[in-house]
Image (cartoon, grey):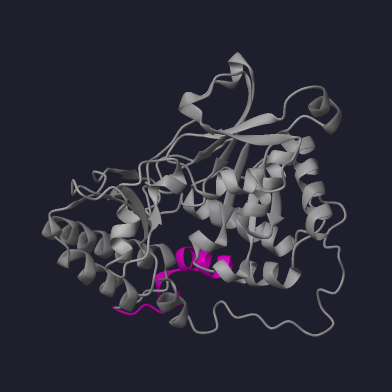
Amino acid sequence: MFEEFWRETGDAAEVVIPGWQTMSYFSDVTNVCWFLEPELDRQVRRLHRVVGNAAVDGYHVLVGTGSTQLFMAALYALAPDAAAAAAGEPISVVSTAPYYSSYPAVTDFLRSGLFRWAGDADAFKGDSYIELVCSPNNPDGAIREAVLDPKTGNGRTVHDLAYYWPQYTPITKRASHDIMLFTVSKSTGHAGTRIGWALVKDRAIARKMTKFVELNTIGVSKDSQMRAAKVLAAVSDGYERRPEQTKETTTTPLRLFDFGRRKMVERWSMLRAAAAASGIFSLPEETSGFCNFTKETAATNPAFAWLRCDREDVEDCAGFLRGHKILTRSGAQFGADARYVRVSMLDRDDAFDIFINRLSSLK
């Protein structure tokens, strides 16, 4: 979806890297995250200050190959050390259902003795855990808070804020959690750049997370970091420059979040109309709130649609839609009922239009 916007920006986000540049493993040996490019650090902090969605003062910025690597690093950093784990059980990793389908897959992939997937946080019984809080939530777009109280046991929380950007939801507060994960894939659309970042309060935790990335991939591509820094700078420039410095057009202003919100509002309107026309699909109710970034009341327009098939003879919604040439991900993969599916709202216009036409024709 964002490709249309970036095609209109000209050279604002282009990067030229000389052959001799970015050859070393090291970026800044005085930094906790020694492979983090200083310019990416600067642009990450700048963008959060522009948007107001996360605190950056007093935080360490860590870079990863996407936020998935940083999620794995957080589990490693928060779990008991190997000696403690050997003496007891691996720490439980939980998240409220429906939860992001990769959480259990990534947690258990290496069959670690340090941590293990334990399912729905609402059903968890115990006092030692890592709770994953995705807000806005993937797959249903709900605003989430932690459901377990770390004060009553040995619990830690990781906040996955990949979708906490103005194109998807009102920015109602400046998040200031202990560990917060973000990614360029959902903020700017550059999924192929494979850059995510974490904001971490505790220096010791930041060091352990950095160690994980060091052992896992010996740092993170500097070329990707430089591109990500340039992209983030272009986004901030669109809001910090005076109007006469910004080339505006009537169709695509060079302000990413304005473009993204307009597209998401349009697409959600089309989807709700298509679901109503079919008579057999339902969607979560639309919610809204005052956005501190736009200074106006705005509706939530999640990156994914949590669609339910209400036909009594359909128990597998993903299979039903696949039969009509619509590819989705089953609710069962998210710890929910198979009558639900997750649908991406971020494809190109032509693919999204085909999806809407096929969905509205189903009865």
Of 46 and 338, nearer the camera is 338
Give the residue displayed 40% in from the left and 78% down from the top: 4
Tell me where the magenta segment starts and ends, as one range: 231-250
Quarter of the image containing the N terminus?
A: bottom left
Residue 335: x and y in percent read 45, 40
Q: Quadrant of residue 38?
A: bottom right
Name the spot of residue 102 as percent of width and height, x first.
55, 50
Instruction: Give the answer, above or below, for where 118 lies relative to 112.
Output: above
Residue for point 79% across, 41% down: 208
Residue 233 is a magenta residue: yes
Q: Is residue 19 visible?
A: yes
Q: Up-down: is 251 above or below 193?
A: below
The picture places residue 55, in percent across and down from the top left corner, at 57, 42
Q: Residue furthest top?
A: 152
Q: Residue 315 at what x, y percent from top left? A: 28, 47
Asked whether 306 falls inside the magenta stretch, the response is no
Q: Is residue 347 left or right of residue 275?
A: right
Dominant SS in magenta: helix
Give the vertical position of 42 relative to 95 (above or below): below
The residue nearer to you, when weighing 316 against 138, is: 316
Look at the image and tell me whether residue 295 can be seen. no
Residue 102 relative to residue 217: left or right:
left
